[in-house]
Image (tube, rainbow, N blue to C red):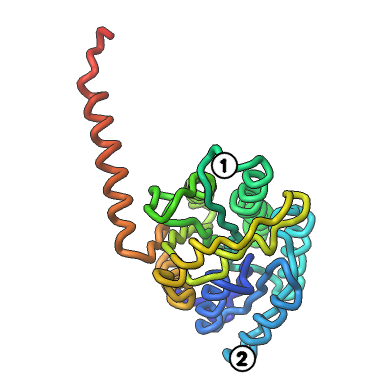
Amino acid sequence: MKDLKDKAAVVTGGNSGIGLGIARALAAEGARILLTGMHADKSDRAAKALRDEFGIDAIGIASDATKRDQVEALADRAYAEFGRVDLLVANAGVGFRGQVHAVGDNDWDWLMGVNVRGLFLACSVFLPRFLAQGGPAHIAITGSEQSVGMTPYGSMPVYASSKHAVLGLADGIRGDYAEKDISVTLLCPGPVATEIWDIERDRPAEYGKRAQSNEESKKIIQELGMDPAIVGRMAVEGIKAGDFYVFTHAYIRDLVDGRYREMTAALNKTDTWPESR
């Protein structure tokens, strides 16, 4: 999808952070955009800013990524506005820190609901529409550096579990739909200067009491976080090139290489395992 001018894009979680960075990069390419978030007023302000700065068609609405009926309504709205959708950016996500023994059921259900179910719903709702409309389409999914390895920035096994699952989802879609002219990009960012450190503000009541904002995460993000505008441009360049992986930080190579070396060592043992055993 080398030329994005006048292409129609839907960006979930697009009213702030990485999602807004991607939306801005798409707007700079001349794409038409429908972006979503949990709060209608915030989404509307983000869309207006895109219209004012880039002169494109941009719409912002509220949509809960974990509710199928709302995702179906989102897709219906996008097709009503644009006639077709060329690009889905499944980006909505939340973060959570804590060792496994300290993570409650509500924490697990909330994080997996947004980070895995939410991205699955977006893809499962839009894929039939992509098949029906014909022609090329693209899905960009926001994973994480923790899709490929564990980072040293505190204990985040539940978050890492969700992002490993996202890698499987993206890779599976890539394999199943390549012959249908539907391509996939997996964005794997390191720390980005977003509001994810304060994501508890959006935890629905059904998932229990909101925890205090994570000050340790805030400190890490403030010190190390990449500008989401840069992440957005990197993601869009990857989409245009048809790349599957987009990594934002050079040190992610160490995570990939470490995983490769460990797996290779294990496979070397497999190669020497006596057949008689």
Secondary element under disc 2, as helix, strand or loop, is: loop
Q: How many marks?
A: 2
Residue type, numbered disc 2: Gly
Q: Nearer the viewer, residue 82 or 266?
A: 266
- Left or right: residue 265 compared with residue 171: left
Residue 269, above or below 8: above
Q: Dot 1 lies on which element?
A: helix
Q: Which residue is mark 2?
A: 55
In this rendering, the label closer to the viewer, 2 or 1: 1
Give how far across and how far down residue 126 sits, in percent. 66, 58
Left or right of 97: which side holds 263?
left
Which label was assigned to residue 102?
Answer: 1
Q: Residue furthest top?
A: 276
Residue at the (70%, 57%) spot, across then down: 203
Q: Residue at x 59, y 53 (%)?
A: 115
Q: Report crowding for label 1: few under 14, some 14 to 19, many 20 or more residues within 10 A (C-alpha).
A: few
Seen in the image, is 225 located left or right of residue 21? Answer: left
Residue 87 appears in view:
yes
Establish if 191 lies above or below 172.
below
Tell me residue 166's x, y (percent): 52, 49
Front residue (pair 113, 72): 113
Q: Residue at x 30, y 64 (%)?
A: 250
Amino acid type, residue under disc 1 in the picture: Ala
| Rendered location of residue 272, percent (x, y) | 20, 21
Q: Which picture quadrant has residue 34?
A: bottom right
**Rounded to the nearest whole Å, what is the CA distance between mark 2 and mark 1?**
48 Å
Image: 46 above or below 132: below
Going from N to C along the chain, the mark reached first, 2 or 1, is 2
144 or 126: which is nearer to us? Answer: 144
